[in-house]
Amino acid sequence: MRRIGRRDIVAAMLIALLAGAVFTSPPLQVLQGLSLDILTALRGKLIGDRRDPATSPVVVVAIDGETYDTSPFKGSPTLTWTREIGRVLGSVTEGGAKVVGFDVIFPSSIEQSEIPFGDAPFGSRLKGFDRDYLIALRKLSDGGKLVLGERLSNDHPERPDRAQQLAVRANIRALNVHTDPDDVIRRMPLSFSIDGKPVPAMAVELATRALGTKLETGPSGAMQLSGYAIPSAVPNTLTLNFRGMGRDIPAYSFADLRACVEKGDTDFFRRAFEGKVVLLGSILDFDDRKLTSMRLSGGYDGTPAPRCALPAPTSSAQKARSDIAGVFVHATAVRNLIERDVVTELGFPMRAIFTIVFAAIIAVAGCMLAPGGALIAWLALTAAYTAMAVGAFVQALALPLTEPALASLAALAMMIGYRFVLADRDERFLRRSFAFYLAPEVIDTMVASGKMPALGGEMRNVTMFFSDLSGFSSIAETMTPGELVTLMNEYLSAMTDIIESNGGYVDKYIGDSIVAMFGAPADDPAHARNAVRAALKCHAKLAELNADNPAFAGHGLSHRIGLNSGEAVVGNIGSRRRFNYTVMSDTVNVASRLEGANKYYGTAIMASAATVAQTGDSFAWRELDAIRVLGRGEAIKVFEPLAEKGAESAEQKTVAAAYAEGLACWRAREFAKAADAFEGAAMNDPASNLFARRAKAYSINPPPPDWTPVNTLEGK
């Protein structure tokens, strides 16, 4: 066993910090979801769940393959099933169900059919077909026993038929789910903002009605349900706990229940549904299938429930699948809330600490032991930690798993490499260890003082610079890895050179995005002017790269840049074990939102009024609009820089003048005049085209008297 000194300990700590920072960084956030998937699989395989499905507080009424093959549904379009659905739901609620939720949406009625049938549309011959169904909906809704589902979307929302909406009044809740970047559902939303007010999601609404309470905000800011503080790693979500791998929720065949209604067996409905939350949904093999954290081990579409009238199908037994029916995702969320069994995930600081500590232990082992012995130590410690994590997951606590395992393995490899460069001098060691995430000025201070960096920050007036390539994901799909790397290196190098040559500091790269600040770490009284100048040069440089650089040929890249100035905390920010020289404040958030807001106006650069005010008369600007960005209630005036003062083209002046005239008319509610003014430049100016269409619409249907000329942006 090799003796280690202070220098080795410092090296191990720094390597652990670096490995922890990498494997808990946003680009590798997918590892957090992978940890949940592995823990779910290991718990299911090693421990399982012995709960009786009959004790489940939630059950599913399943529109399954049997339903489609059984009379009277066989060969009938689903729009004709509504009356039978109403009859079954009536029996379910009469049997004592607390509340029924719809995971199916009937966006239209057969009565609306315009298909010719004889001398009249088919729908006109079926007037009144849905009357009994609508009466059933109204009765159940008025009794607080029914919630219909809808899917919210800015582009294509999906809602029940208008008659159904009127029947149930306000008893409609969103079925939208929270999907991670890898298209896996591990969490569910708690609420949605509708008309500026938080409205519970479907699962939360059903749980609140079952518990006879409301969703509230607790003293700590966490959402509470009947005194239960709902754990929420991602704001406004709960992390699903698939404790029974889907088999802990009974699934009643809709066909059998319909036959049970015909049979008149009211006792069966009482035994099956008394005191239960009921979800109606499809469990077909091809409809509404969801990947969840059960994807590695496989989940089940519930457990077949007792039968009432029809014989059980002769099909083979259930098999585990990587995807499950969406209705069981909602059912699991309801059960988690009622039983207070939501998974608690550690926040980013604690996950980083777990990862860094584990990596540090392995790094020290790598410094003390031979490479083979260190690898065996890694295997043994990782196995022991995994067992501890599975034990914690049984108690609904999700410890990070993949991040510590991978970070420690990387730390081990780095420590073995370090042992070959023991003669490195301290300055070289510090620069190599911190160059990727501390500003050069900070590293120079460290080298001069001979001290490690410490936590701390200061309030500075800065200008934040956010940029992002437009539609880059679709372009990247057409490129080989080598081409993509070459393109990104060329682009990021060119943009970084411009930013740094104008006094900016690149805080971080996030994929193809760049986050930079002007005014820190080095003092710069002209930080706003330098930021705007850098943005204009970056835009011009991208056009040059598109025209002359072979790596950019045929791709036609474009980017969006957001600029905002204001007070911010800058400095070494983080935990005692890991921190970055970075910036924090609302100034940063607004700059990020302005970058995204460019896509609504078709602009490349957007700056706030605060930035414009700090640039003096250095640039020619045009005011774009007053907007309200996501997550911020106050309206912001936004501007587009055209060029250095006096360098704008004749066309830019003409468009800016017409736009200013149209904007003044818009704000004065003279929409017809505004449309005429914007129309003149709409052909070549997306922002003018946007306002021309908005002004035309308002000239036909004027807004209410309390209208304010503020555009509320719903996306980021």
Image (cartoon, rainbow, N blue to C red):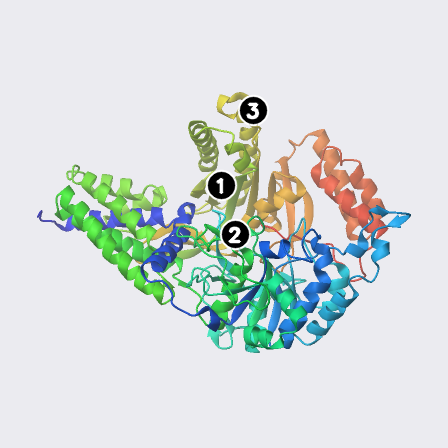
Q: Residue at x 44, y 54 (%)?
A: 293
Q: Residue at x 41, y 56 (%)?
A: 458
Q: Secondary structure at mark 1?
A: strand
Kindly identify which residue carries mark 2. 290
Instruction: Tell me the amino acid under the disc marked 1.
Output: Ser
| Chain-order first, disc 1 or disc 3 | 1
Q: Residue at x 68, y 64 (%)?
A: 85
The foreground one among 60 and 462 is 60
The foreground one among 64 and 113 is 64
Is residue 89 something one can see in this rendering? no
Instruction: Tell me the amino acid under the disc marked 3.
Output: Gly
Mark 3 packing: few (<14 Cα in 10 Å), some, or many (20+)? few
* 3 and 2 marks in contact (CB < 8 Å): no
| Numbered disc in front, either 2 or 1 | 2
Separation (CA) of disc 1 from disc 3: 21 Å
| Chain-order first, disc 3 or disc 2 | 2
Left or right of 693? Residue 46 is: left
| Numbered disc in front, either 1 or 3 | 3
| Chain-order first, disc 2 or disc 1 | 2
Kindly identify which residue carries mark 1. 513
* 1 and 3 marks in contact (CB < 8 Å): no
Q: Secondary structure at mark 3?
A: loop
Image x and y of residue 252, in percent: 56, 64
Vertical side of 578 occupied by 639: above or below: above
Image x and y of residue 503, in percent: 45, 39
Image x and y of residue 623, in percent: 68, 45
* 2 and 1 marks in contact (CB < 8 Å): no
Instruction: Tell me the amino acid under the disc marked 2.
Output: Lys
Kindly identify which residue carries mark 3. 554
Mark 1 packing: few (<14 Cα in 10 Å), some, or many (20+)? some
